[in-house]
Amino acid sequence: MNAKTIRQALLLTGTALLSSLVLTTAAQAAAVRQSPIDINPASVTSAKAPLPIADHLASDVTLDVLNTYNASGKVEKEWATLKANVPAGSSIEVGGVRYSLLQFHFHTPSEHTVKGSHAPMEVHFVFLRDGAAPCDRSPDALLVIGARIESGAPSAELAKIFDGTTLPVNSASAHLTIPHVNLAKVLGQLSGTWRYSGSLTAPASFAPACVEPEGTIDEQLEAKDLPENVSWIVLSHPITMSAPQISAFKAIFPAGNSRETQPLNGRSVSAFN
């Protein structure tokens, strides 16, 4: 190999290393609004103006409930969940912007913590902003309402899923059809919230019809950079389920299915009453 060839090889190697460094740095820089987070009520910012939530959640729907671990076949169990798909027609409005409800699902223990403490479970209601495409990766294309679930009085609506039914655990084709669910009664009152800008808490493949511009599941997890396209609303007052209802879900995911809390990276959390 002559001197010119050696110089060209070194130049190409240096360019490749620089490109790799730039891509790695960009990926790290992008991961600045990851979810979930720990919320310290003493450190949140009180909202200067009210931004009420107007809900238009159906009072009588039929849910299609499935276990995404079995349904997908390619998601590790720690990233799976029990998901309830809802028919079209339910929505909320926040600051005059309408979001349509797609589905809700569960985690154990809670993904969001309050002063470092987990609740036994958390439910996430996932909404898509009107005008956004299902695979939209732009900031705030999705809005998620999260409610921590404590052990206490049974939930009459969630009892329709967790009481007296065989939850889908091992069968890839197992779906539960749950009729006559009042969506508004699952979350209850939507006053008293913490709000911040964040991300999904599981890889983007949970929308199987979508492309994955952030990379494969493994690449997303290695970079610790899940799609940052979510406006988060976390209810400051938890809802309750009975101990047997909580145990029924934990039996499906005995090792848990929650992502660890992520750094705030300078983000603010706003409190709305």
Image: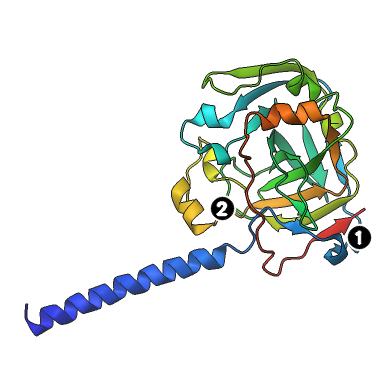
Give the quarter of the image for residue 166.
top right
Residue on which the image places disc 2: 226
- What residue occupies the far left of the structure in this picture? 2
Foreground of the two, 156 or 226: 156
Q: Secondary structure at mark 2?
A: loop
Can you identify the residue that label 1 sits on? Answer: 49
If you read the primary sequence from the N terminus, does the residue marked by circle 2 or circle 1 appear first?
Answer: 1
Q: Position of residue 152 (x, y in %)?
A: 88, 34
Tell me the residue at 81%/43% (across/down): 93
The location of residue 231, given as percent across then percent down, is 72, 52
Instruction: Name the secondary structure under disc 1.
Output: loop
Q: Nearer the viewer, residue 273 or 223?
A: 223
Q: Is residue 220 left or right of residue 189?
A: left
Left or right position of 24 against 165: left
Q: CA distance from mark 2 to mark 1?
A: 31 Å
| Residue at (78, 52) in percent of width and height | 117
Can you tell which quarter of the image residue 9 is in? bottom left
Point out which mark residue 269 bears: none
Q: Position of residue 68 (x, y in %)?
A: 57, 31
Instruction: Answer few, some or many: residues within 10 Å of disc 2's Cα (few below 14, many 20 plus, some between 14 and 19).
Output: many
x and y, in percent, of residue 63 in the image: 70, 22
What residue is rendered at 61% in x and 19% in y?
Answer: 175
Q: Is residue 81 visible?
A: yes
- The image quadrant of residue 151 is top right
Name the image quarter holding the N terminus.
Answer: bottom left
Q: Nearer the viewer, residue 225 or 109?
A: 109
Inspect the image, locate mark 1, and give the three-letter code of the amino acid beneath it.
Ala
Outermost residue, bottom direction?
3
- Position of residue 258 relative to residue 15, above or below, is above
Residue 214 visible from this viewpoint: no
> Which residue type does callout 2 highlight?
Leu
